[in-house]
Amino acid sequence: MLCIIFSAYTETENDFSLQLVSFGGDLNLGGGNSSLDFFNIYYEIFGNLLGFRFSPLSLKSYFFGRQANTNSVSEMTFLSLDVYYNLLNNDNHLIGPYFSVNYLSIIDWNGIDPQFVTISLGVKYIAKLDMYSFIGINYFAEYEIAYRYNEIFGHHFYLGYKVDLLSLIVFFSGRSNSSNR
């Protein structure tokens, strides 16, 4: 069986998790994109009040609107970092402000541009599922409403989502197996 999430708990209530792949997208008035994020690392401290999400590889494809009509329609980012704060006193649901920086991107396969930085600031909701109790908490879905800026697409507000792709497949295959019994 393929392990999707690995977690380690310490006496100080820190949480470490690894997510293999997530699928997501953004929607704004100027266009939208779809994305795949690989090897997402989550780390939460202070009883899950402060969290970090690091993704070493993210692929985006802009599929319609103003953004797709520019010269840039694909993006590969090597360093993505989110920092978020949990306003809820709940281990399975997080909601609160977050800040995100994406750096070292290849735009339309034209080489790495070290000056291209994307900054996002907004509100994030994360739903965790205890689907894999033998390997820890699963970061199942993320939703965000935020402001984003980069030099190609400028300033805009957007709605975004990310879903753990492999957990979604396991979840629906488990539901179909239980309905066939």
Image (spheres, rainbow, N blue to C red):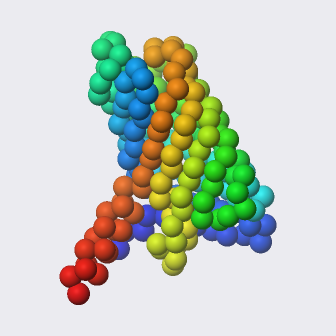
Q: Is residue 124 visible?
A: yes
Between residue 4 and residue 176, name the one nearer to us: 176
Q: Is residue 110 visible?
A: no
Within the image, what quadrant is residue 171 found in? bottom left
How many labels, in total?
0
Relative to 7, is 72 above or below?
Answer: above
Residue projecting furthest to the front: 29
Residue 128 in the image: state x and y as whole percent: 54, 62
Within the image, what quadrant is residue 46 found in? bottom right
Q: In which quarter of the image is the C terminus?
A: bottom left
Q: Quadrant of the N terminus?
A: bottom left
Residue found 51% across the figure and 46% down from its top:
143
Within the image, what quadrant is residue 36 found in? top left
Residue projecting furthest to the left: 180
Between residue 89 and residue 138, name the one nearer to us: 89
Residue 58 in the image: state x and y as whole percent: 43, 38
Residue found 52% across the figure and 77% down from its top:
133
Q: Is residue 100 left or right of residue 47?
A: left
Q: Is residue 168 left or right of residue 152?
A: left
Q: Is residue 179 left or right of residue 130?
A: left
Relative to 162, is 145 above or below?
Answer: above
Residue found 47% across the figure and 73% down from its top:
132
Relative to 108, is 102 above or below?
Answer: below
Residue 53 in the image: state x and y as whole percent: 59, 47
